[in-house]
Image (cartoon, grey):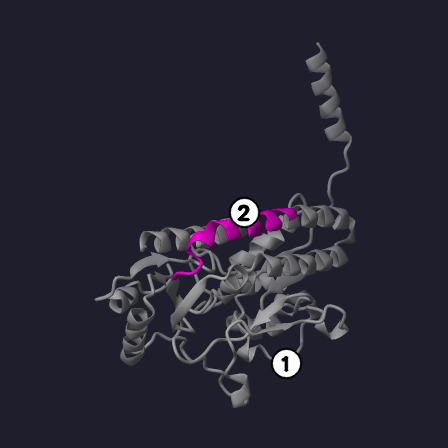
Amino acid sequence: MKSTSALLFASTMLLAAPAAAAGPNVVVSIKPIHSLVASIMQGVGEPSLIVEGAASPHTYNMKPSNASALQAAKVVFWVGPGLEAFLDKPLDALSGSAKVVELSEAPGLEKLKFREGGAFEAHDHGDEGHGDEGHKHAEGETEHDDAAAPEAAAGHDHGHDHEHGHGDTDMHMWLDPVNAKAMAAEIEKTLAEADPDNAGAYKANLEALNKRLDDLDAKLAETVAPVKDKPFVVFHDAYQYFEHRYKVRVAGSITVSPEVLPGAERLSQIHAKIKELGATCVFAEPQFEPKLINVVIEGTPAKSGTLDPEAGTLDAGPDLYFQLMENIGTSLKTCLASAS
């Protein structure tokens, strides 16, 4: 009888609880960012995703359905033109009055410069007019956004000129959980301003997300600690935020831009570098041609593995970011430990 009464009471309370107001239409560019947005929108709504499945933002082409989603959006989150170049013009043309938030400009982000020369493929800066001093950066060189500066705010109505100096900045910023927290804070702030009726839910979700990110950070540090001094080579230089955070040793990259495959000379250089440095693993990515990896490890003791920085093999949703980061840590540990 008591249990029946308790169930009736709980049911009554659920029915009496006010329903959350419908959330705004939110569109997100890529899976890792979508996961953070989905976490903060839990219980309110579900954001739409542009780059779905195993597609890569480096090679993506807009679909009519993407254009329709942008037209209907109230808020659009992306990293920025340095990563999702395919979105730059469509956002100007299609997003109407949507609030477009460039998360690479979120306050508090730690940014790293592209690495070039030696074991790292040169990055094509195009006609951006950088001098030589903008091309040679010491490993781990960083720049910080000033969280107190009003011009550093990431959110803005579209129609801007993108003069943020992305040309020499590595845009894979989400591969550090501390940067993910900075992005999440900007996401929560934007959603609360766009949808004040659900501001309380966004705030509570952000607090829960930050706790998960702190736990993830500690877990990843523990996972890679036994192998952090073993050098490895990656398909493209997307991992330096992870490297910088956890002090693992990326010895070089086969290419810096996945849309431009390396030539024979470059492959020969990397092959020699693997032998010289004693790199124990070379990591491919699921979206790109794996036979390149086999070419560069041929005749060396290096093993091959797979890393997926953009979560192409994972299902979108709130848990994706955590699966993505844990998979990178586990893949590094598994390959590098087996190469001992």
Tag 2's secondary structure? loop
Tell me: 52 left or right of 335. right
The range drawn in magenta is 211-230
Spatial CA distance of label 2 from label 1 is: 33 Å
Residue type indicated by callout 1: Glu
Residue type indicated by callout 2: Asp
Tag 1's secondary structure? loop
User: Could you tell me which residue is drawn at 50 percent across and 49 percent down?
Assistant: 222
Q: Can residue 153 be seen in this view?
A: yes
Check disc 1 and report the residue beneath it. 163
User: Could you tell me which residue is drawn at 64 percent across and 80 percent down?
Assistant: 161
Query: Horizontal and vertical percent for residue 162?
Result: 62, 78
Badge 1, how many Cα within 10 Å: few under 14, some, many 20+? few
In-front residue for pair 248/210 = 248
User: Could you tell me which residue is drawn at 21 percent across and 66 percent down?
Assistant: 299
Secondary structure predominantly adopted by residues drawn in magenta: helix
In-front residue for pair 262/34 = 262
Query: Horizontal and vertical percent for residue 217?
Result: 57, 52
Q: Considering the image in quadrants, where does the N terminus appear? A: top right
Query: Horizontal and vertical percent for residue 174?
Result: 56, 61
- The image's mark for residue 230 is none
In-front residue for pair 312/233 = 233
Check disc 2 and report the residue beneath it. 319
Above or below: residue 144 compared with residue 281:
below
Please say whether residue 263 is one of the residues in the magenta stretch.
no
Specify which label sits upstream in the sequence, 2 or 1.
Answer: 1
Badge 2, how many Cα within 10 Å: few under 14, some, many 20+? some
